Amino acid sequence: MELIRLIHNVRFDTPVGLFLSTPLTVACLILTVWSLIPAIRGRVDIPFLIWLRLTWVTLLLPGVTGILLALGGLKVASATDAGNGATRYGFLPDPSRNWEHWMYVAFCLLSLYVLEVLVRGRLIEHQEGLRFLPVVTLFLYGCAFMIGRVAVFPGSTPGT
């Protein structure tokens, strides 16, 4: 169980703090910047597709370990009292953050699926769909950012 928790809780202590706090946020930020190139050129190159698949891995690895931890009865750190009425980060616990954490994970999964649809040109004409890549990847980065934020900080109802 400790190995699963270790894999799930990979975090970077960077000078920019929460904006690049996990491998998922880093992968999503790079994907967001990189998505401008296919949107402008009108075609997707193989390196972009490889990075998109790597972004899937950076979401699914902590996602699967998170499911395993949830099945073991654990909740997100901001919703769990670690003792003395505080979370492991020193804030008041907020149980509603657990559901928010899962909601943002679902939004990330949906965003990555939409990216796959846009890149393949299935539901929308390929050239036109590529114009939406930066918007979808920016939404993906925002959701990845919120996954990390919700895991650490309490919401508007701490202590309830």
Image (cartoon, grey):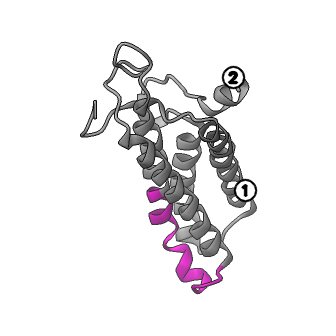
Q: Residues within 10 Å of mark 1 (few under 14, many from 20)?
A: few
Which residue lies at the image location 43% right of the left edge and 23% below the top edge?
Answer: 15
Q: Residue furthest top?
A: 84
Could you tell me what secondary structure mostly forms the magenta stretch? helix
Q: Position of residue 50 (x, y in %)?
A: 73, 55
Q: What's the amino acid at mark 1? A: Pro
Q: Position of residue 25 (x, y in %)?
A: 52, 42
Residue bearing mark 2? 2
Assess whether residue 100 is covered by the magenta stretch: no
In the depicted structure, whether residue 67 falls above or below residue 74: below
Q: Position of residue 48 (x, y in %)?
A: 67, 58
Please state the extent of the stretch shown in magenta in the rendering.
121-139
Left or right: 69, with 36 as reference point: right
Left or right: 75, with 149 as reference point: right
Which residue lies at the image location 41% right of the left edge and 20% below the top edge?
Answer: 89
Residue 3: assigned label: none
Q: Residues within 10 Å of mark 2 (few under 14, many from 20)?
A: few
Residue in front for this viewpoint, 5 or 136: 5
Element carrying mark 2: helix
Q: Residue furthest left?
A: 156
In the depicted structure, whether residue 76 falls above or below residue 139: above
Q: How many marks?
A: 2
Assess whether residue 124 is covered by the magenta stretch: yes
Q: Quadrant of the C terminus?
A: top left
Q: Position of residue 149 (x, y in %)?
A: 40, 37
Which residue lies at the image location 46% right of the left edge and 54% below the top edge?
Answer: 103
Residue bearing mark 1? 47
Q: What's the amino acid at mark 2? A: Glu
Separation of residues labelled 1 and 2 (CA atoms): 35 Å
